[in-house]
Image (cartoon, rainbow, N blue to C red):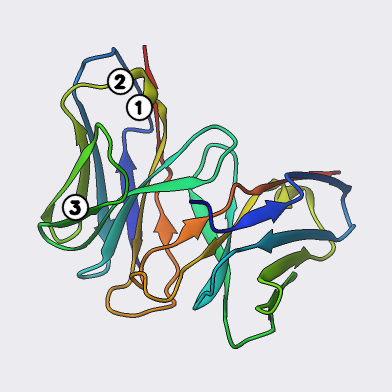
């Protein structure tokens, strides 16, 4: 069966520090991968999605970047964090090449910027 | 921009009662999905309904879709305390990548034992 791992679960970082959040998927090949941010009491905002290694699409201009160095690895990064980067970050995957597919989420990283 | 909007924002019911949540959206869709999120956790996919379907069932869940009104409802029958969570609808859109979903802000359901 497929599983998705996301870490760390919580992270407290000072303003201006770098960031690296990692997400890996097991049990499937060539998945579509997604990074979302969820503000408190709000819906999900799609930040990045990837349909293959090295293929990254960004949905909103921001202080963050994403990379997909391996088929089932998706990394969210920042060189210098801002206060506004605080939030709950969720990674997700879906089957590739097919429409009408559900997305499967990790348990998220709660990022607090001080 | 937000595609789906859930209503109500919050709902509190007694265990055993039915819970109904609604979702409205603005543009044409290929399919609509419902997800559940327990506090502090990731989202879990519940059910997907295609634009040519009107109703779908899964266990105690019943989803309806009215494309003429651009709305969907999620009914949870015989609710349990374990159903306490936030529920989100998500839509794709024709012309967008089939893998992109737009989520609403959610309905927070509290089931009181």
A21 versus A69 height, above or below:
above
At horizontal 45% and vertical 71% (from top left) the residue drawn is: B93
User: Mark 1 Cα within 10 Å, few/some/many (few <14, many 20+)?
Assistant: some
The quadrant of the image that shows the C terminus of chain A is top left
Q: In the image, which disc is placed on residue A82?
A: 2
The residue mark sitting in front, 2 or 3, is 2
The residue mark sitting in front, 1 or 3, is 1
Q: Is residue B26 visible?
A: yes
The residue lying toward the viewer, choosing from B31 and A106, is: B31
What's the CA distance linking mark 1 and mark 3? 22 Å
Relative placement, left or right, of A113 versus A55 is right
Asked whether the residues under the numbered discs 1 and 2 touch, taking CB atoms below 8 Å apart as contact, a structural biologist would say yes
Residue A82 x %, y %: 30, 20
The residue lying toward the viewer, choosing from B49 and A3, is: B49
- The answer to which quarter of the image holds residue A63 is top left
What's the CA distance linking mark 2 and mark 3? 25 Å
Asked whether the residues under the numbered discs 2 and 3 touch, taking CB atoms below 8 Å apart as contact, a structural biologist would say no
Give the chain letter at badge 3: A
Q: In the image, which disc is placed on residue A85?
A: 1
User: Mark 3 Cα within 10 Å, few/some/many (few <14, many 20+)?
Assistant: some
The residue that label 3 is drawn on is A73
């Amino acid at each position: 069966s497929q599983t998705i791992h996301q870490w760390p679960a919580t992270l407290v970082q000072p303003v201006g520090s770098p960031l690296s959040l990692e997400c890996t998927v097991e049990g499937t090949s060539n998945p579509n991968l997604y990074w979302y941010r969820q503000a408190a009491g709000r819906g999900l905002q799609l930040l990045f999605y990837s349909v293959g290694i090295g293929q990254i699409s960004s949905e909103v201009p921001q202080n963050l970047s994403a990379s997909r160095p391996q088929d089932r690895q998706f990394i969210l990064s920042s060189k210098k964090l801002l206060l506004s980067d605080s939030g709950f970050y969720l990674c997700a995957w879906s089957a590739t090449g097919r429409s009408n597919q559900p997305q499967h989420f990790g348990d998220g990283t709660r990022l607090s910027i001080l | 921009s937000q595609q789906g909007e859930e209503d109500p924002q919050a709902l509190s019911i007694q265990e055993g009662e039915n819970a109904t949540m609604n979702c409205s959206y603005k543009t044409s869709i290929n399919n609509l999905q419902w997800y559940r999120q327990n506090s502090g956790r990731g989202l879990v996919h519940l059910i997907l309904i295609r634009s040519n379907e009107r109703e779908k069932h899964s266990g105690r869940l019943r989803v309806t879709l009215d494309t003429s009104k651009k709305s969907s409802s999620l009914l949870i029958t015989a609710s349990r305390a374990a159903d306490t969570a936030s529920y989100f609808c998500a839509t794709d859109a024709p012309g967008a990548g089939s893998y992109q979903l737009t989520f609403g802000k959610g309905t927070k359901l509290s089931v009181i034992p």
